[in-house]
Image (cartoon, grey):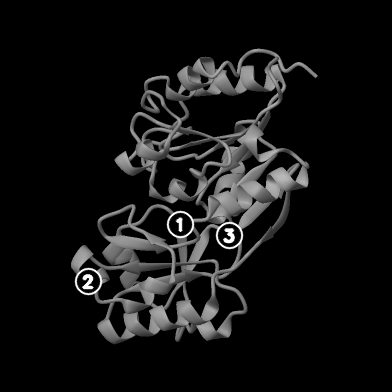
Amino acid sequence: MNRKRYLFFDIDGTLAAGGYENFYIPESAQLALKKLRKAGHFLCIATGRAQALAVDIMQELGFENMVSDGGYGVTIHNSLLGIRPLPKENIVALVRECQENGYPWGIQVDNSDTRLVPDDRFQKAAQDIYMKQNVVKDLDPNDYDNIYKAYVACNRDEEKTLTALKDLPWYRFHDNYIFIEPAYKSVGIKKVMDYFHADYKDAVVFGDSGNDISMFTDDWTKVAMGNAIPELKELADYVTDDVDKNGIYNACEKLGLFQPVMC
């Protein structure tokens, strides 16, 4: 009997190929999503992106549910239930180190597509197309109640001088700067499963990168893309093909997820 499954998809490198500059959803992945819905499964995005930066993708692909902000944000039936901020004191400590070392930095203080920066040095150093930015003179993280993400323009040697990073989740997706953002997707996934009173063993997660490691737990089935990092493949129950080589479709077919759910 094919039971209802709760499927959680990372976006970049899992559902989507091409990176930020050439972002696209392979046709085979779009077809897989249609067949999964027809079969009767629950579909949910699971992304490190801010909810505001992922909601258009979510809706374009026909999703109503999303784990965002690296697990700290949950959207159910197109309604944002909330986003948990990062520990403010740790962000303040990081910013002070950046100021002492002269590293350009920025913070995200709301659910939007815009980061705040104290000057234009961050954009010049990062050459970033990921977010918009707003220059705030004398920007101080202490002036804001919540901080959801932070960004530091530094190279790999410079990042080693930032001792505050040891108390924060962070990733380097680009050579020019690092993201300080939650990496606890499993927390958001469990909130979604609990919301629907679903058994954790009925969840299936799909991912490819370091910020997906937290959701590759033994609570549920784990699928790594062919283009995934080696560490994630080692944790996976099944490794499929690359994102641009029918990876999502082939995995769903292999797992028998296109068969109609038997109620």
| Most distant residue in the right direction | 263
Q: Which secondary structure lies at badge 1?
A: loop
With respect to residue 29, does 139 lie above or below?
Answer: below
Q: Dot 2: few (<14), some (14–19), or many (≥20) neighbours within 10 Å?
A: few
Query: Distance from label 1 to label 3 (Cα)?
Result: 9 Å
Query: Distance from label 2 to label 3 (Cα)?
Result: 28 Å
x and y, in percent, of residue 14 in the image: 45, 34
Residue drawn at x 76%, y 42% as measured from the top left: 77
Residue 50 shows in this picture:
no
Indicate which disc, 1 or 3, sits on the residue closer to the N terminus. 3
Indicate which disc, 1 or 2, sits on the residue closer to the N terminus. 1
With respect to residue 243, does 192 lie above or below?
Answer: below
Q: Dot 1: few (<14), some (14–19), or many (≥20) neighbours within 10 Å?
A: few
Q: Which secondary structure lies at badge 2?
A: helix
Residue 38 shows in this picture:
yes
**Side (left or right) of 156 relative to 26:** left
x and y, in percent, of residue 144 in the image: 58, 80
Q: Which of 145 and 159 is in front in this view?
A: 159
x and y, in percent, of residue 168 in the image: 44, 69
Q: Are marks 2 and 3 in contact (CB under 8 Å)?
A: no
Residue under label 1, please give it: 131
Residue drawn at x 63%, y 44% as measured from the top left: 66
**Side (left or right) of 105 relative to 52:** left
Residue under label 2, please give it: 158
Residue under label 3, please give it: 112
Indicate which disc, 2 or 3, sits on the residue closer to the N terminus. 3
Q: Quadrant of residue 154?
A: bottom left
